[in-house]
Amino acid sequence: MSRYVPWLLLSLVLFACGGDDEPAAAAPELAGTSWVLTAGIDVPGWEQVAPSAGFADGKLTGANGCNRYASSYTLDGEALELGDVAVTNMACGDPGAAVETAFMDALERVATARIVGGELTLLDEKDAELLRFREASPLGTWEVTAFLQGDGVSSLVEGSRITATFAEGGKLSGSAGCNDYSGTFTLGSGTLTIDDVSATELACEIPAGVMEQEQAFLAALPRTARYTLEGRSLTLLTEEGTIVATLDASG
């Protein structure tokens, strides 16, 4: 089978094995959950750029350690068949480049998907494990890169910084650019709601526009209904799929 080349469409013909007399396996619930890799890549430092996978509306998308990839998929019981895979063409140093190669090589050999104990395992046609994922979680500290202001998503005022920390127990906190803020959140399988947002009451003049930006950010947060996670990038979305905010992992 040919190796992965950026932007080359890779045809992956995948099937599940099993005896004719074996009962059909139940289809795993892939859709609606963002997954992040936990095992399967033997590259030092791969955790820094852990690949991701998301299944929705017959499409598989994610980050492969360096670039983003996308493919169609069909699921018949546990048998997973991917269509042509398209990959972006950004150059990366290590470990990203090495992780990308290892991940794409493994993805080419996937034939079966199985969820056990909340973990997604992708296996080859001989039922050998290739890649293992856990459900991606927004828990942790993030740097906001852009958010919904009015009718569009805008980047931050130059010289300003907005953060968000999603902590165990449903506590949200961070800096809104001038003031510290806090709130609560409820996390589900791909869903995220934010409530009870409040902030301190300092006034800041520098950088120009930071107070207006802060007010817009705090007003946007409660519109969050769900999220996606690809690699180290978190996107908060409205119920309709409009971007509320984009964030990068801190540290």
Image: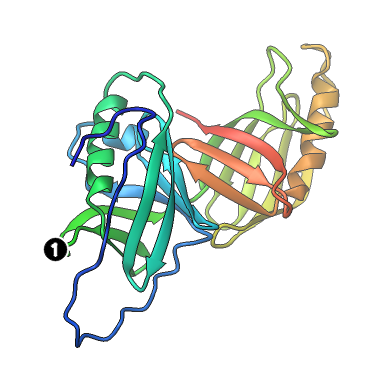
Compared to residue 93, the image places residue 127 above or below, namely below
The one of 125 and 121 positioned closer to us in this rendering: 125
Q: Quadrant of residue 242?
A: top right
Q: Please identify the quadrant where the N terminus is shown.
A: top left
Residue drawn 36% across the image and 53% down it = 82
Q: Quadrant of residue 201?
A: top right
Where residue 32 appears, x then y in whole percent? 53, 60
> Which amino acid lies under the numbered mark 1 shown in the image of this protein?
Lys
Residue 67 lies left or right of residue 213; in this view the side is left
Compared to residue 115, the image places residue 187 above or below, namely above
| Callout 1 crowding tier (Cα within 10 Å): few <14, some 14–19, many ≥20 | few
Report which residue position mark 1 lands on: 126
Compared to residue 12, the image places residue 181 above or below, namely above
Can residue 216 be spotted in the picture?
A: yes
Residue 213 lies left or right of residue 242; in this view the side is right
Residue drawn 42% across the image and 48% down it = 53
Residue drawn 17% across the image and 39% down it = 42
Colour mode of the rendering: rainbow
Residue drawn 46% across the image and 35% down it = 232
Can residue 199 be spotted in the picture?
A: no
Where residue 41 appears, x then y in whole percent? 22, 42
